[in-house]
Amino acid sequence: LRFAMAPSDAKWPSPYGDPRSPETIQPYKKPIAREEDQDPDFRALASLGLGLAGLFTKNPYFSWGALYMSISAMCSMSHPEVNMKQATTALMFSLSGLLTGYINEYRLRGHEAAGAAA
């Protein structure tokens, strides 16, 4: 069997020539990240929901979950310059939920101590 060899001056079927030639290599340019193009971050969204639930129900367990999720969202951001607003809002809601959840226990302990002293 004989195989037909292509002549050395044969052109590639592509109009751009040989795709392996070093002259056609272009350096990679990272695309610019815009806020409207980003997918919503699940952790930040869950943190926001848990923070609101903890804030409105005054349940500290929701707020602890929100705090964990918001810190996790901040640590795993792909574009921190874009997503920081959502993560800090979720962090503030989780901290506010913790404050409102534990402020009642602090007040109740104060009244119990005043009643026991009298």
Image (cartoon, rainbow, N blue to C red):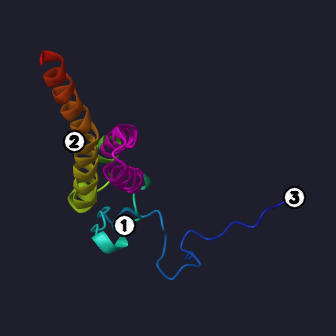
Q: Residue furthest front?
A: 118
Which residue is tagged 2? Answer: 99
Task: Look at label 2 and name its amino acid.
Answer: Leu
Q: In this view, does 113 lie above or below 51?
A: above
Name the foreground residue: 36 vs 48: 48
Q: Is residue 37 above or below residue 74?
A: below
* Disc with the residue nearer the chain's start (1 vs 2): 1
CB under 8 Å between discs 1 and 2: no
Image point (39%, 43%), residue name: 62
Which residue is tagged 3? Answer: 1
Q: Which of marks 1 and 3 is in front?
A: 1
- Which disc, if any, is residue 103? none
Secondary element at tag 1: loop
CB under 8 Å between discs 2 and 3: no
Image coords of residue 53 (percent x, y): 39, 52
Image point (69%, 66%), residue name: 5
Horizontal side, residue 17 vs residue 23: left or right: right
Q: In this view, does 2 lie above or below 75?
A: below
Q: Nearer the viewer, mark 1 or mark 2?
A: 2
Image point (39%, 55%), residue name: 49
* Disc with the residue nearer the chain's start (2 vs 3): 3
Instruction: Report the span colored magenta.
Output: 43-70
